[in-house]
Image (tube, grey):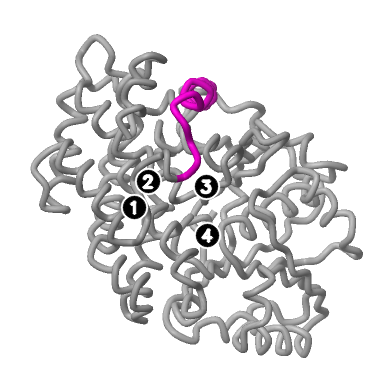
Amino acid sequence: MKQELLRGSGCLAEVPAILAGQRVLLLTGRSAGATPEVEALARELGQVGTLQHVAFSTPLLDTREVDRVAASIEPRPDAIVAVGGGSIQDLAKCLKATWDCEVATVDELLGEVLGAGRQSEDSPGPGDGAGRVRGHETVHVAVPTTAGTGSEATCFATVYRDLRKESLEDPRLLPAVAVLDPTLLRGVPARVAGPCALDTLSQAIESVASRRATDASVDLAIEAVGLAAGAVLPAVLHRDLDAMARMQLASYRAGQAIQLTRTTLAHGLSYALSAHFGVPHGLAVFLVLPAVVRFNAGVGPEDCLDERGPAHYHARMERLFATLDVADHEALASWAEGLLARLGFSPRLADHGIEPADLRRIVDSALGSARSGNNPRRPRFEDLVDAIRST
């Protein structure tokens, strides 16, 4: 599916003309819905079509919340304009999937590639898109208000069921339109912008490391790292508009990269930190990233999951080291810990409420995630517990 990309300050104003004459659901975060830009968008959408506005906020998107929102919308819209962070974009994708596939609950679709049954662990991408959609396809216009998840560039959604992370995936879940308007990032506080920026960097770094990395995905991920590394501090700490625009593009490029590769072990470990300890997602990933980087440094022929071998993995990482001007895995891990501190976050898990006794449960949860199988080095339980204990 080809996506239309709008970029630049003020480009949000182009959206109403695209959706003229349609029934539109405007889906926003509670704070995003009150901004002047979004209030103007709502007025103009109401003038050119039929508008329903839902403001939504949740730390973790749960299947029951999706079903509640889906049941409250009548009639079903022709289009969803989702203005918000990753959870809002994931909610829009889940609503689209529920309505387009004409199912009663999103639970019926979880774990499936909607067009081709269950996803194979050996298949990096979505299915062929045949057979599940029964009704009309709902148009999704993704308007990110954070520079973080890159959800506007992917065809999958994250949702939790009983505090366990699940995925929904299909080629048609790629938003039809992505709107990168950096003016929408200005009102995001540093405590939110920081974890979002860390998510962008984590996704890009993990995409380079992924056993499914390709030349195209590495190019996208390296571009994302280069953009974000220079922009993260002025964007988060000083709210510099040009830096926020670079972070927004970095997030989009990182999303395009993980669309090809998916994320790896650091994301797998992070889900329990968010679900059970309330650590914001991007921060949770970056807290465990240094341990994963150090763990992956020891990959050898006997435990390399990348069929191209350890040398291929190390060659990709050399490109990453050069982009960040670091010497090796240890220097990359130290750089990540230093960035956490510069953004005002402790790199120690204990300072986020996670005790040594919790580590075995966190690792056990990660090893049950598909993200762990995407890692370049085969994760072993005790080795991971030891690696994370050092943080």
Tag 3: residue type?
A: Val
Tag 1: residue type?
A: Leu
Residue drawn 32% across and 45% down? 217
Q: Give the range drawn in magenta.
A: 352-369
Q: 174 or 208: which is nearer to us? A: 208
Question: Nearer the viewer's eye, disc 2 or disc 1?
Answer: 2
Q: Residue furthest left?
A: 327
Residue drawn 67% across and 36% down? 163
Q: Mark 4 points at which residue?
A: 152
Question: Nearer the viewer's eye, disc 4 or disc 1?
Answer: 1
Question: Nearer the viewer's eye, disc 4 or disc 2?
Answer: 2
Q: Specify which label sits upstream in the sequence, 3 or 2.
A: 3
The crowd level at tag 2 (other Cα within 10 Å; few <14, some 14-19, many 20+) is many
In three-dimensional space, the C-alpha distance between marks 1 and 3, rounded to whole angstroms, equals 17 Å
Whether the residues at callouts 2 and 1 have beta carbons within 8 Å, the answer is yes
Tag 2: residue type?
A: Phe
Q: 151 or 33: which is nearer to us? A: 33
Q: Give the quarter of the figure containing the C terminus.
A: top left
Instruction: Note whether residue 259 is visible.
Output: no
> The residue tagged with tag 2: helix, strand or loop?
helix
Q: Specify which label sits upstream in the sequence, 1 or 3.
A: 1
* Magenta part, dominant SS: helix
In three-dimensional space, the C-alpha distance between marks 4 and 3, rounded to whole angstroms, equals 23 Å
* Residue 195 forms part of the magenta stretch: no
Label drawn at residue 279: 3
In the image, residue 213 sits, relative to residue 304, either above or below, namely: below
Label drawn at residue 201: 1
Whether the residues at callouts 4 and 2 have beta carbons within 8 Å, the answer is no
> The residue tagged with tag 3: helix, strand or loop?
loop
The crowd level at tag 1 (other Cα within 10 Å; few <14, some 14-19, many 20+) is many
Q: Name the residue under label 2.
A: 286
